[in-house]
Image: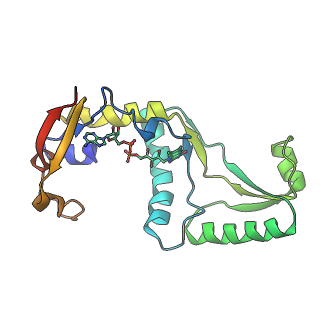
Amino acid sequence: MARAASRRWSDVFLVEQMPRLGMGASTRNSGVIHSGIYYPPGSLKAELCVSGNKMLYEFCEAHRVPHRNCGKLVVAHGAAQEAALEQLAENGRANGVEGLRLVDRAAVRAREPHIEATAALLVPTTGIVSAEDLVKTLAYTPMKSQACWATAAIASTLCAENTANWFAPNLTWSITSCIRCLTRAD
Ligand SMILES: Cc1cc2nc3c(=O)[nH]c(=O)nc-3n(C[C@H](O)[C@H](O)[C@H](O)COP(=O)(O)OP(=O)(O)OC[C@H]3O[C@@H](n4cnc5c(N)ncnc54)[C@H](O)[C@@H]3O)c2cc1C
């Protein structure tokens, strides 16, 4: 968001209460680039996850963030779980996840010799990313376009009249105008 906003305004601040950027969930997660197979079709989460998957690979390529498009196997043991896999595949296809394929025991074995499964759903668009490197790159990229950051600083109050426009398509606010009170955390 800071990157997008800083293309238009010169007074954009990224505010972080911790001593360094990226000390929250974003560097402590599993580093999975999710495909979007699980979300309900038609939901905003499904739409954003599927489009975000492609955008994240493009961003990682463009900014040399370590990542790997390794794919994922969702495995099944027995007929009941295989039926659930087919439903999951349908769900993923409805969300626009590309390349989903049900594979048999032999295909699972060929790919992952230590996994015992009767079948699996192959999800080629899943991957992994170095979360730490991603956050650092995301943090530095907006700075190239003049945004600033403040660490050890807490945004304590947001202006109600500006937050109402937060998600408006024609943004007329600047982030700094939303920050009424900026105090040092230490
Ligand atoms: C265990 C776990 C595993 C996960 N695995 C994955 C995964 O594999 N793949 C995936 O895509 N997602 C995963 N997620 C989800 C993902 O990590 C989060 O959706 C994402 O990190 C949220 O990013 P964020 O910027 O909203 O929050 P954060 O990364 O937490 O950033 C918010 C920042 O705002 C700061 N802050 C808060 N309040 C203030 C204030 N008043 N003033 C100043 N600063 C403030 C915080 O200190 C924090 O640094 C996982 C989540 C968890 C918990």
Where, quadrant-wise, is the C terminus in this rendering? Answer: top left
As drawn, is 65 to the left or to the right of 159? right
Question: Does residue 19 sit above or below 80 in this rendering?
Answer: above
What coloring was used for the rendering? rainbow
Residue at the right extreme of this rendering: 106
Q: What residue appears at the point 45 percent right and 30 percent down from the top-left corner? A: 133
Write down which quadrant ligand 1 falls in: top left
Question: Does residue 109 sit above or below 86 in this rendering?
Answer: above
As drawn, is 164 to the left or to the right of 70? left
Q: What residue appears at the point 52 percent right and 33 percent down from the top-left corner? A: 130
Position in image of residue 47 (x %, y %): 46, 65
Question: Does residue 21 sit above or below 84 in this rendering?
Answer: above
Residue at the front extreme of this rendering: 186
- Residue 94's quadrant in the figure? bottom right
- Residue 184's quadrant in the figure? top left
Position in image of residue 132 (x %, y %): 46, 31
In terms of depth relative to the viewer, which is nearer, 176 or 156? 156
Q: What residue appears at the point 42 percent right and 34 percent down from the top-left corner? A: 63
Q: What residue appears at the point 57 percent right and 44 percent down from the top-left corner? A: 32
Position in image of residue 128 (x %, y %): 58, 40
Position in image of residue 93 (x %, y %): 62, 69
